[in-house]
Image (cartoon, rainbow, N blue to C red):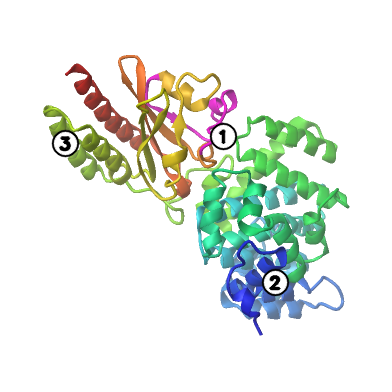
Amino acid sequence: MTDTKAKQPPRKGSTSGWVSYLSQVEMPVLAETLREISQLTDSSKSTVNQLADVILKDAHLTSQVLRLSNTVFYNHSRLPVSTVSRAITLIGFNPVRAMAISSLVIDALLGRNPRGQLMRCLARALHGAVQARCLLPGNRHEQKEEVFIGALLSNIGEMAFWACHTPQAEELDNALHKEEPVAAQQAVLGTTFAAITRGLVESWNLGQFVREVVAPGRAKSDKSALVRHALVLVAAAEKGWQHPSVSTAMDALSGHLGQPVDEVRQQVRDNAREAAEVAVTYGMQQITSLLPDHDEPRGDGGLSSQGDQLLQLQILRELSALLVEKPDLNLVFQTVVEGIHRAVGLQRVVLLMKHKKGPELVTRKVLGEGTSHWREEFIVTPGVAGDLLAAIVARGECIYLGGGDDPLWNKYQAPGFDRQVGRSPGLFGPLFVGKRAVGLVYADNGGLFQPPDQEQFLAFSHFVQQAQLCINNLADT
């Protein structure tokens, strides 16, 4: 019987409390099915029929395994597969077991709560899994699936947490904007994601190798060391291939593999592109834009921002009418921010203006989900050496700042007010009175993980120009 205390998420609870809650309340079916599949091993005691029977209990899982069994990633022979037992015989016990585990985890998590933090976790896990599988030397197919699952489940505690609708999820999401991850986790959860992961690995019987990957301390085998190197690499790659931490991770990986770093670098880039293809194969098109070297998001599955050109024209006409007479500054700025958000389709928009008593630019107006903390924390001090936002303001023009590959991220210190700015490409438009910076407009697509396109940048620039005209008119009067 379910423990009464486990029916509610722990309030600054223990690791065991969170493991019980996630296992018994939020994901009991996933936990039990993973236990059942994980306990089956490729031995005389576990037959083809036993694994097939577990998969065939779930019609969706069956169709997913058969679909994956006919992809190049798993089926190198390219012989068609139409039954689960045939897939196990042709492709192998461990590869099919890996397909089943991967599909169960991905479908269970995505079906619950596709929030931004979960998408980032899934992207990191799948990218790490593909890197580990592809980097493992030789053609040891059984071991390749082992490292794939080891990497995929290496942050299962974090993924399970973000998949759940709990008050702590929103609280932690906000805390992560202000504190380092481990400190924020301890403050909100009373434990860490790493500890919850280790607890779930034990509770769900996810196997000795996954246990080895997530254990604290030094890696106990070359395979688990490889998985850890791959995970460090993919975390660094989120900041862009040119980031110094990527070079450090590449050097460590090169030393582990005993291969020249240039060869490893090329292979890793190829693997990243394959990870995007695997994501689509697993039905996770929406995470492809989070992967390095991704193609543009597909229109059949990814989340997208929606602009409205007719609404843009209408709002721009209203702004022009406001500017004919002496403009109401607050009304103009409110209209600009609303136009960028609703008509241009950018998900998060903030307008900063000069503080009355100092040089800082502080938040005046803000729109978009997850931006409430910006009112107190989004501050820019023009003229500060080495500060990214100060450097952008000094440029004096609207700019598009891309992802981690953009050279500006390596040249200047990233903004500390929000950990998501710097991962999400954004648009910046400074405002001036003469040569003196008095404001800044910032906008991005937030949790959609879709970079603003050229049309959005042009429309954003038009709205910023209207705000600048308003300031010019007031300065002339």
In percent of width and height, residue 65 lies at 63, 68
- Residue 89 visible in this rendered orientation of the protein: no
Amino acid type for the residue under numbered disc 1: Gly
Q: Secondary structure at mark 1?
A: loop
In percent of width and height, residue 311 lies at 22, 44
Query: Of discs 3 and 2, which sits in the foreground?
Result: 3
Going 57% across and 59% down the picture, which residue do you hit?
162
Q: Is residue 396 above or below residue 317?
A: above
Q: Residue furthest front?
A: 357
Going 51% across and 40% down the picture, which residue do you hit?
418
Q: Which residues are magenta?
A: 396-417
Disc with the residue nearer the chain's start (3 vs 2): 2
In percent of width and height, residue 209 lies at 81, 60
Instruction: Categorize mark 2 by other alpha carbons within 10 Å: few (<14), some (14-19), many (20+).
Output: some
- State whether the magenta stretch is mostly helix, strand or loop: loop
Q: CA distance from mark 1 to mark 3?
A: 36 Å
**Which label was assigned to residue 404?**
1
Circle 2 residue: 34
Q: Is residue 133 left or right of residue 468?
A: right
Q: Secondary structure at mark 2?
A: helix
- Residue 427 visible in this rendered orientation of the protein: yes
The image quadrant where one finds the N terminus is bottom right
Circle 3 residue: 317
